[in-house]
């Protein structure tokens, strides 16, 4: 069946809904740690895509995105905590059944949190009238910190001790429904006249002004919309964790979100999604030694695949590679649940085997030609070496055991050092991020998976 | 009134520290337009190098200071060559992220290597003629004005003044100093005039890092305690100081640092110590909204 | 009534007076050249007209209405468009998008319609695209419409800048050294293009140029600037022989 332009949007929507409902139904049966990671991925997708709107598409570096998240988190949590019960009762009196009242209250709280965050976005965007580039970035940084200081003073939401007892409303569906909405909103915005105006502000602000674009208005719009979704993400976060604390929204958190966007590629929505996935999974994977090894294994594959991906015309290969990387990232998390000991070998090996198989297929797709074969061979050799390490730890010399013990004792510090090292390496190796400016459009999907056909042949 | 003078004196002492660190930020921003997030951690490394030099190599104060400055100068060059130079042609955001990465690397690497617990910094290092000279100066000040200022703080102020004066002379009078100003003004033109911009940029990092190391050692003398994340807050505040004074402007960084220190102590003394860090950000916002180019900055006219 | 009037305009920058007591008028539909040695203040005049700088003294009027001190985007909406001395295209955007941004600035639809993809949105987008493509076609750039601006050859980039300016539907077009870096045949083509554009789009053109062939060839009137002051005005032939002009360009003792 050919998927024409008209047919595919409803089909895609249907597929997304089916996935959401299916996974949501399966969620209670899954490992809760995994579910948590998946929900965090969803929240980070919202954060990364909304930041991309401000920084990637409109070119305004924003180092205070966590501040917007905090506003949404605290306001929505405060509303449901103090007013939620009463509102639900009121709704009940009006005849709305209990199972509906809860979500309605949550939605209202989320929206109000988002709107308040949007207002803050306007406040931060207004100084752009007089500030450019670096100075604006510094202001956004300062804003984030000042906001945190204000929250620390607010006893009504727990101040520095933290705010606990927030009702849990966030589910898998809530998170991913909003993630989808964020992606759709940003995509629709960018593929319109207003999106082009935002892009022109990024490209050359003065020229845009001279062509009639009110650049300050557009910058404020970008901040407002980006902040709105960040506020929503904050609300979802608070109602999942059921606890909030100002330290969760520090400058470091803002930087993490910036990293997701940069990693994926500024100016690419698909890139932000990829970046969010990788940077949510990576720190988790690095929590254990097995996870670290899995990450190292993944990076070895990346090193193998990168030259193939970097060749000119590699946009479609990049997409294939990104998907492969995402798959491996998920795989690494699964492995990180395991542990470098005798008992778990049986559980780890099939995953390693599966992972290597998946990677081999992805590499073949990504490489595209026979020239890729020697590289794949190297990759398989590396994979085999890792399998050996997992399966037969006794082949390592005794000093390695001592090293391994030291590593086990210092995992959390080592984790941050590795994280920082990877960051530096990433910037040196590929500063434009994984996808650069490439998007995951239908055309790209078509070139990777020829099943998706268009009615009209591509124009020469 | 004495209390005000007391706070002022403390503020000047701390402000000198901020000034020393701010110089590094401002010089690097001037030549590279980069906010070197890792700079505050160089300050920390300086303190640790001095610590190990004194504790294990039994170095004296002056020797430790020199070793720390030299070590950090080297560190600065390594960071510049390894992490920033390869990204010269790339958009500035990439370098900024790298700088953040280096900062995280140094902080967490420090915690890994040195352990996260604070270490007591050897005091009683001020010996001999210098110590007694400072002690009598301190006593004299207390007698005449009632202001209590420790000999370590006097040392900080004196050392900072000497170093800043030296730097000012260097930048204004020597050929290398002129070259730095030229590169900061227009890198392309400077290289066309025969200036080796790579060397000059490295020199900038050398000077900035050495000054930060000196600040680290001097502060550790007074606070008597070091830990791997001691550079975070002072780094941020020194950065605000650099912006306050006009980022890219050397005398501005010095002025900005002193003002930051004084403002911080006045707020702590008269309002509350819980606003100690917030005052830095408040100053930041105010200056950016009122005069983003800082106290000494002129409006940069964009050539169309 | 003149379309554009500069009335005793002066502008100071930190101790330098870039333009001093400048009075200039452009009639509707006229083709006027603005010439002078480098650093004479010509681009500064353009910047004042388009709102990038605010004159320190004097007034600028479009159709009798004062526009001095208006923000650049308001000046654009009032009907003045320009190109730049150093090309300032939106490098990563396609040629079509470059032109569309300029075309849409005056008639955007609300953001909500963009987000919801209404039928009004679809219609407006189609109209915008058609409008933009028409301009591109007129300037011979239609076949390059999908190409990112940075990938275009120099001459086409210059044309694209003009196309972009035209898309704002101006009544006055300011061209800043449009033939810079072009060889003689490209220059001749551009001269014809400017004349054609003036007729087809019914606009006045104020042109900064160094290439005397262009100035003498297409300008109806020429204004000569030196050190921020008008030293001569008139038809090209009169200017060519004006001693003050010759001295300004060649310095003292030109014999």
Image (cartoon, rainbow, N blue to C red):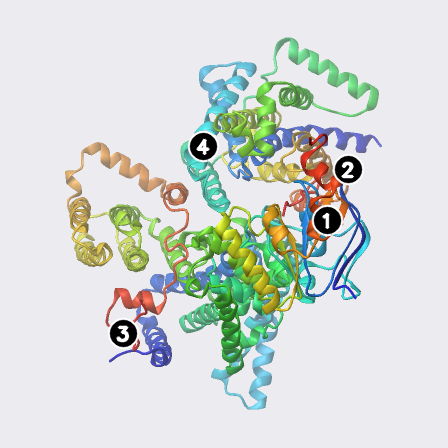
Q: Secondary structure at mark 2?
A: loop
Q: Secondary structure at mark 1?
A: helix
Q: Residue at image x 45%, y 58%?
A: A267
Instruction: Give the number of the mark in front: 3 or 2.
Output: 2
| Dots 2 and 1 on the same chain | yes
Sort mark 4 into few (<14), some (14-19) or many (20+) by Cα contacts within 10 Å: some
Q: Position of residue C80 (x, y in %)?
A: 67, 62
Residue for badge 1: C238
Residue A404, compared with residue C171, is above or below; it is above
Q: Secondary structure at mark 4?
A: helix
Instruction: Give the number of the mark in front: 3 or 1.
Output: 1
Residue for badge 3: A453
Looking at the image, can residue A229 be seen? no
Q: Quadrant of the N terminus of chain A?
A: bottom left
Q: Residue furthest right?
A: B1
Looking at the image, can residue B213 be seen? yes
Q: Secondary structure at mark 3?
A: loop
| Foreground pick, B54 / A200 | A200
Q: Which of the two discs, 2 and 1, labels the residue nearer the N terminus? A: 2
| Foreground pick, C30 / B71 | C30
CA–CA distance in space, label 3 to label 2: 66 Å
């Amino acid at each position: 069946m050919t998927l024409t332009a008209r047919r595919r949007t409803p089909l895609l929507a249907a597929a997304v809904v089916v996935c959401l409902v299916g996974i949501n139904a399966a969620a209670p049966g899954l490992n809760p740690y995994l579910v948590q990671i998946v929900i965090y991925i969803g929240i980070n997708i919202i954060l990364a895509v909304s930041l991309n709107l401000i920084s990637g598409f409109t070119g305004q570096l924003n180092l205070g995105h966590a501040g917007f998240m905090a506003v949404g988190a605290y306001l929505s949590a405060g509303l449901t905590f103090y007013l939620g019960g009463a509102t639900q009762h009121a709704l009940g009196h009006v005849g709305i059944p209990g199972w509906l009242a809860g979500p309605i209250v949550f939605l209202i709280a989320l929206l109000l949190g988002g709107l308040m965050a949007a207002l803050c976005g306007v406040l931060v965007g207004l100084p752009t009238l007089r500030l450019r580039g670096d100075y604006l970035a510094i202001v956004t940084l300062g804003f984030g910190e000042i906001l945190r200081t204000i929250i620390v003073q607010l006893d009504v939401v727990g101040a520095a001790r933290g705010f606990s007892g927030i009702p849990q409303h966030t589910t898998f569906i809530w998170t991913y429904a909003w993630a989808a909405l964020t992606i759709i909103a940003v995509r629709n915005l960018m593929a319109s006249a207003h999106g082009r105006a935002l892009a022109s502000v990024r490209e050359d602000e003065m020229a845009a002004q001279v062509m009639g674009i009110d650049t300050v208005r557009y910058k404020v719009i970008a901040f407002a919309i980006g902040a709105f979704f960040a506020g929503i993400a904050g609300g979802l976060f608070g109602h999942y964790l059921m606890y909030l604390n100002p330290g969760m929204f520090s400058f470091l958190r803002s930087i993490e979100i910036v990293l997701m966007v940069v990693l994926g590629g500024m100016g690419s929505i698909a890139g932000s999604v990829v970046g969010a996935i990788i940077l949510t999974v990576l720190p988790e994977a690095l929590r254990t030694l097995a996870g670290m090894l899995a990450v190292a294994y993944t990076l070895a594959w990346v090193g193998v695949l990168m030259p193939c991906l970097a060749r000119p015309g590699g946009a479609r290969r990049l997409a294939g590679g990104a998907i492969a990387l995402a798959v491996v990232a998920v795989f690494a998390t699964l492995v990180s649940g395991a542990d470098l000991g005798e008992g778990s070998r049986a559980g780890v090996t099939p995953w390693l085997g599966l992972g290597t198989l998946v990677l081999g297929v992805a590499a073949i797709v990504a490489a595209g030609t026979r020239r890729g074969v020697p590289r794949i061979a190297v990759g398989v050799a590396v994979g085999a070496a890792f399998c050996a390490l997992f399966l037969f730890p006794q082949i390592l010399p005794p000093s390695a055991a001592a090293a391994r013990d030291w590593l086990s004792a210092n995992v959390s510090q080592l984790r941050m050092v590795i994280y920082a090292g990877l960051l530096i390496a990433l910037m040196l190796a590929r500063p434009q991020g994984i996808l650069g400016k490439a998007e995951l459009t239908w055309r790209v999907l078509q070139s990777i998976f020829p099943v998706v056909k268009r009615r009209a042949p591509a124009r020469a | 009134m004495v209390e005000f003078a007391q706070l002022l004196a403390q503020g000047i002492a701390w402000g000198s520290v901020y000034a020393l660190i701010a110089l590094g930020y401002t010089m690097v921003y001037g030549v590279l337009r980069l906010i070197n997030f890792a700079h505050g951690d160089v300050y920390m490394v300086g303190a640790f190098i001095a610590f190990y030099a004194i504790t294990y190599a039994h170095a004296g104060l002056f020797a430790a200071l020199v070793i720390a400055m030299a070590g950090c100068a080297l560190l600065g060059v390594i960071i510049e060559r390894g992490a920033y130079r390869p990204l010269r042609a790339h958009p500035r955001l990439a370098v900024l992220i790298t700088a953040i990465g280096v900062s995280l690397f140094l902080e967490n690497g420090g915690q890994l290597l040195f352990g996260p617990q604070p270490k007591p910094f050897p005091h009683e290092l001020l010996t001999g003629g210098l110590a007694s000279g400072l002690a009598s100066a301190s006593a004299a000040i207390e007698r005449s004005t009632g202001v209590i200022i420790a000999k370590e703080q006097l040392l900080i102020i004196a050392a900072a003044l000497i170093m800043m004066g030296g730097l000012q002379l260097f930048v204004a009078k020597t050929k290398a100093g002129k070259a730095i100003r030229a590169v900061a003004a227009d890198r392309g033109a400077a290289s066309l005039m025969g200036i080796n911009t790579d060397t000059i940029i490295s020199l900038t990092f050398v000077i900035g890092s050495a000054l930060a190391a000196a600040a680290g050692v001097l502060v550790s003398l007074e606070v008597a305690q070091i830990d791997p994340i001691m550079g975070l807050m002072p780094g941020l505040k020194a950065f605000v100081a650099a912006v306050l004074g006009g980022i890219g402007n050397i005398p501005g960084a010095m002025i900005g640092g002193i003002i930051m220190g004084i403002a911080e102590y006045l707020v702590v003394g008269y309002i509350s110590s819980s606003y100690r860090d917030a005052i830095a950000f408040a100053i930041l916002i105010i200056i950016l909204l009122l005069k983003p180019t800082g106290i000494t900055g002129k409006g940069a006219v964009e050539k169309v | 009534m003149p379309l554009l009037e500069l009335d005793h305009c002066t502008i100071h920058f930190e101790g330098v007076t870039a333009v001093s007591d400048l009075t200039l008028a452009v009639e509707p539909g006229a083709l006027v050249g603005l010439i002078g040695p480098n650093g004479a203040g010509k681009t500064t005049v353009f910047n004042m007209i388009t709102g990038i700088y605010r004159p320190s003294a004097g007034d600028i009027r479009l159709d009798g209405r004062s526009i001095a001190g208006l923000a650049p985007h308001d000046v654009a909406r009032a009907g003045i468009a320009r190109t730049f001395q150093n090309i300032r295209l939106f490098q990563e955007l396609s040629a079509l998008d470059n032109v569309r941004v300029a075309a849409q600035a005056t008639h955007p639809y609300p953001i909500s319609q963009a987000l919801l993809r209404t039928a009004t949105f679809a219609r407006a987008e189609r109209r915008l695209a058609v409008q933009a493509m028409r301009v591109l076609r007129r300037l011979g750039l239609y076949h390059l419409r999908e190409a990112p601006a940075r990938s275009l050859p120099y001459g086409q980039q210059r044309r694209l800048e003009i196309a972009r300016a035209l898309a704002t539907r101006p009544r006055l077009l300011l061209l800043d050294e449009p033939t810079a870096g072009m060889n003689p045949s490209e220059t001749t083509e551009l001269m014809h293009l400017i004349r054609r554009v003036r007729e087809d789009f019914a606009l006045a053109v104020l042109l900064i140029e160094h290439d005397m062939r262009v100035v003498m060839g297409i300008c109806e009137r020429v204004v000569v600037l030196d050190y921020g002051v008008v030293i001569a005005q008139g038809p090209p032939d009169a200017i060519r022989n004006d001693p003050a002009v010759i001295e300004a360009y060649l310095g003292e003792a030109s014999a």
